[in-house]
Amino acid sequence: MDRVRGSALLLGVLLAGSLFALCAAKEEAKKLGTVIGIDLGTTYSCVGVYKNGHVEIIANDQGNRITPSWVGFTDGERLIGEAAKNQAAVNPERTVFDVKRLIGRKFEDKEVQRDMKLVPYKIVNKEGKPYIQVKIKDGETKVFSPEEISAMILGKMKETAEAYLGKKINDAVVTVPAYFNDAQRQATKDAGVIAGLNVARIINEPTAAAIAYGLDKRGGEKNILVFDLGGGTFDVSILTIDNGVFEVLATNGDTHLGGEDFDHRIMDYFIKLIKKKHGKDISKDNRALGKLRREAERAKRALSNQHQVRVEIESLFDGTDFSEPLTRARFEELNNDLFRKTMGPVKKAMDDAGLEKTQIHEIVLVGGSTRIPKVQQLLRDYFDGKEPNKGVNPDEAVAFGAAVQGSILSGEGGDETKDILLLDVAPLTLGIETVGGVMTKLIPRNTVIPTKKSQVFTFEVDANGILNVKAEDKGTGKSEKITITNEKGRLSQEEIDRMVKEAEEFAEEDKKVKERIDARNQLETYVYNMKNTVGDKDKLADKLESEEKEKVEEALKEALEWLDENQTAEKEDYEEKLKEVEAVCNPIVSAVYQRSGGAPGGEGADGGVDDEDHDEL
């Protein structure tokens, strides 16, 4: 009886609402700088910042607003983003992608086992976790955890933001699929730490996208369904938006369904076709598969706007060129079961939310794969002809919402974001196994977070969706509290510290490579400019004595030969060589200008301008 009474006394429910969220945000704002929003995607990533009253999605150094989530290793350097993806076909075993499909998973997971057969790089078992084994420079083989590779991508997004903002960034909101479990969320936070970021908050991708849709929507209550089909994951969330309050009613999804799976179906189709037509099996040829993967993605994208595309690949195998048509109808047939699979989570989320189809006011499409006409048609059919809303950019909406959440946490959002309140939910039911293997549910799925439920033991889910458990011994009254860290699969603090150090070493190495390239460019630019100057009649060609011209040309010729022979020289070598060439050329150029009454630089190598012109700047 006492035990029952004790349990009853402990049985409590604490739902932290708006007061908690606002107090927490103010508390965090005290110690946070500018907080960027990062959408860490399976295939592409995106970064945004809230600035001057609106969100800026930041373009990378290539001018693109989304960056491929790819990392490549060559003998000389580490490549991230477009540079990595562009060289993948010629360097398949050393180019890593789709790492989000490995993060927070166990090696024996059936999804990991399936993915191992589809990627050209090597996935190995290290303490029950999938690690990536790859050759880095000088033939050295290294194993990386999925968190480390993700950290490299996060680091690239951090750099992109820093270059745009002109200051160091330490804090970020990072998004995850709504259906990510505890281990996957923890691993994503760890990746942020390795990248040198304080992950101020982990938020769910469809919730972030809902903010992008609803930020400027005022007026009455609206029910929206966010359909988020990306490169590797799929989420459905149903929310109520009411004057800045975003309340998630239900969420569902599949953390292993997306555009990559559609690409694989195209690849399988062509692999079989090649075998049938040419008697050649390319399924183990990583170079051929790399080329085919690139073209399969291009074909899929093109088929969203046209009914047929020709897939053409030069020298796909044995010097044979490949050219085959692919129709939209064939593409839809190849992926029919996968497209239809997306409707299951839609139905479950609708049931959990307790809404009728007619009660959904807007269907918001997020993720590049929602551009596929068949996916849109299935949604239209399910909602009896209702047209999906295409008002948000499917590639950028998640980073946009994350940036808004970042501005709330930092306090930089001002009046525009002060009334926004997110009430998200736990995607999975949480409970404890009791005698006889029965699960006692404590926190049912779709419970608003942060939340805490007690029943002899206490389950608490924080704002990041991460679980804390407290147990009490009724006999002694002693209690213990732990954060569920999934210790078997999660990185230890020592490993994280080591990875942070290695990430810093990689960044230092990247910096050295950039400095070396810059020094080489400086030398080349000087040599070619000088060559042009002494060879141009309008510049110095007619003003140089033959002996002077010979001396300059000899120095330039020798410098170019040296450049050809020293492709991998160090930064200091290039700088030394530049000084040598300048020591020969500059005095001669100065002498010519003095003879002709001009000033060096007036129309010399740099095409410079008088210093006085710059006084105002």
Image: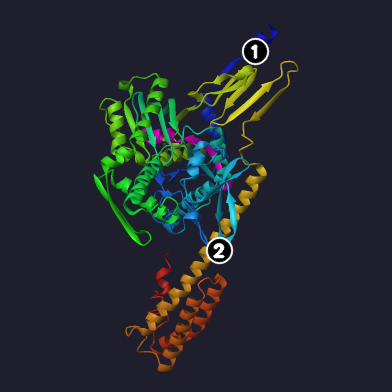
Residue 77 or residue 94, whichever sits in front: 94
Residue linked to disc 2: 512
Counting from the top left corner in percent of width and height, residue 379 is at 31, 30
- Vertical side of 164 occupied by 207: above or below: above
Q: Secondary structure at mark 2?
A: helix
Sequence-wise, the earlier of marks 2 and 1 is 1
Q: Amino acid at mark 1?
A: Ser
Residue linked to disc 1: 7
Residues rendered magenta in the picture: 194-214
Residue at 29%, 47% in the rendered image: 302
Q: Secondary structure at mark 1?
A: helix
Residue furthest front as drawn: 279
Image quadrant where one finds the C terminus: bottom left
Residue at 34%, 35% in the rendered image: 365
Lateral position of residue 52 relative to residue 186, left or right: left
- Vertical side of 497 occupied by 509: above or below: below
Residue at 28%, 45% in the rendered image: 303
Tell me if label 2 and label 1 are in contact, CB under 8 Å: no
Lateral position of residue 582 relative to residue 324, left or right: right
Instruction: Quote the CA–CA distance across marks 2 and 1.
Output: 62 Å
User: Which of the 4 image quadrants contains residue 11?
Assistant: top right
The reply to whether residue 211 is visible in this rendering is yes
Residue 467 or residue 437, whichever sits in front: 437
